[in-house]
Amino acid sequence: MKYLMQWLLELLQRFLRSLDLPLLAAVLMLMGIGLATQYSASNESVRGVSMQAAFYIVGLGALWVASRVPMHWLKQATPAIFLCSLVPMVLVLFIGGGKYGNHWLKFGFFNVQPAELCKLSLPMMLAWHFDRHRLPPRLSVLLGALAIIALPVGLTLLQHDLGTAVLILATGVFVLFLAGTSWWWWVAAGVLGGGGFAFAKLAPITWLSFLRPYQQDRILTFRNPDNDPMGAGWNILQSQIAIGGGGMTGKGWGQGTQSHLNYLPEHTTDFAFSVLSEDFGWLGVLLVLALYTFLIGRCLWIAADSRDGYARLLAGAIGLSLFAYVLVNGGMISGMLPVVGVPMPLLSYGGTAAVTILLGFGAVMAIRAYRPVHR
């Protein structure tokens, strides 16, 4: 019995050797909260929660496998991984499906959203690109990076998926920032970004004719949801009611009225955080935001602790990408940003997004586990 226990202990140590336990603990807590939120949002649907739990299990398996991959192997394979991630992005334009565009590839009983994979493959490719040159990057190196970013962003825009395109662009921009791009580029980007925000808020609708009708409706709703409370403004107004209705401690798990009475649309996906706010109140919101903050900080700490340029850029970009997810979804459900269909990480229902996020955390754990190789 003694030898069996020793063998089991050694086996467990080998299994956990590559895992960063603080990071894993925060991820598991978020997943538990996500399942509780999905149970409430889906009107206590065991099937929906079981499906999400299955996605999490697959994602945790992918996380463990990624955490075991040595960084020099991953670095060498990065160009091939990036090119392979672009293939389904092209295929989905011809054989894909979706409510507002060609977003999904169907494989039997499940769907895959190829654009989600680029949220990980793009920062990997940019980290590989910058690691081959002296930093801060020269103009020629920076132009090459912008060309790399343009590929997945352009393919995503062709799918008419503006929200995912914004997030993919953000992951690329974060790598540019971490690579030490000159400050005047960021001043110019800030001016352009502020101008674009003001344009969306103030421009006449005729100037937005390049957008699809449903995208124009989202811009108009962002400006003033009260203009059409029973139509285009319904989503945001009901989300705001759910967020405010939870108060400090919430109405109780499964007691929220906005989702249970079907006032809140997309309550298992885009607006899952609104359901959590109504059920658990600001205390629940603060707990989830604290977990996100810890995950982002842990990724940045692991990035700073690495001596390898590729690993440092990749870990930092993954952490900041999580920040972009939370910022965009939080701004969307509160009416501070237009509705662009961005899920809240590990809270919203979805398989491809969850597996991709967990794969990213696995890569960060690999960077932490194999850091002696970099020194």
Image: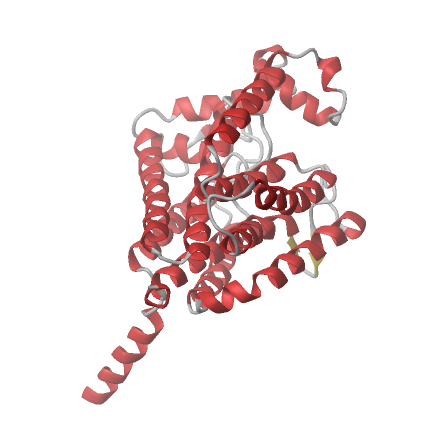
Looking at the picture, does residue 142 appear above or below residue 77? above
Which quadrant would residue 199 be assigned to in this image? top right
Q: Residue 69: give x, y in percent of width and height.
A: 46, 69
In this view, the residue farthest toward the left is 2
Is residue 122 shown left or right of residue 9? right
Which quadrant is home to the C terminus? bottom left
Is residue 83 shown left or right of residue 66? right
Looking at the picture, does residue 124 appear above or below residue 279? below
Count of numbered badges drawn on the protein:
0
Which quadrant is home to the N terminus? bottom left
- Residue at coordinates 75% horizontally, 51% vertically from top-left? 90
Would residue 1 be seen by someone viewing this image from the given angle? no
Q: Nearer the viewer, residue 301 or 41?
A: 301
Is residue 294 shown left or right of residue 360? left
The structure's colour scheme is secondary structure
Q: Residue 305: give x, y in percent of width and height.
A: 31, 54
Would residue 221 be seen by someone viewing this image from the given angle? yes
Q: Nearer the viewer, residue 131 or 55?
A: 131
Q: Nearer the viewer, residue 295 or 25?
A: 295
Looking at the picture, does residue 152 appear above or below residue 267? below
Q: Residue 281: give x, y in percent of width and height.
A: 34, 30
- Residue at coordinates 37% horizontally, 42% vertically from top-left? 292
Looking at the picture, does residue 361 appear above or below residue 333? below
Which quadrant would residue 363 be assigned to in this image? bottom left
Which quadrant would residue 284 be assigned to in this image? top left
In this view, the residue farthest toward the right is 94
Q: Residue 68: give x, y in percent of width and height.
A: 42, 69
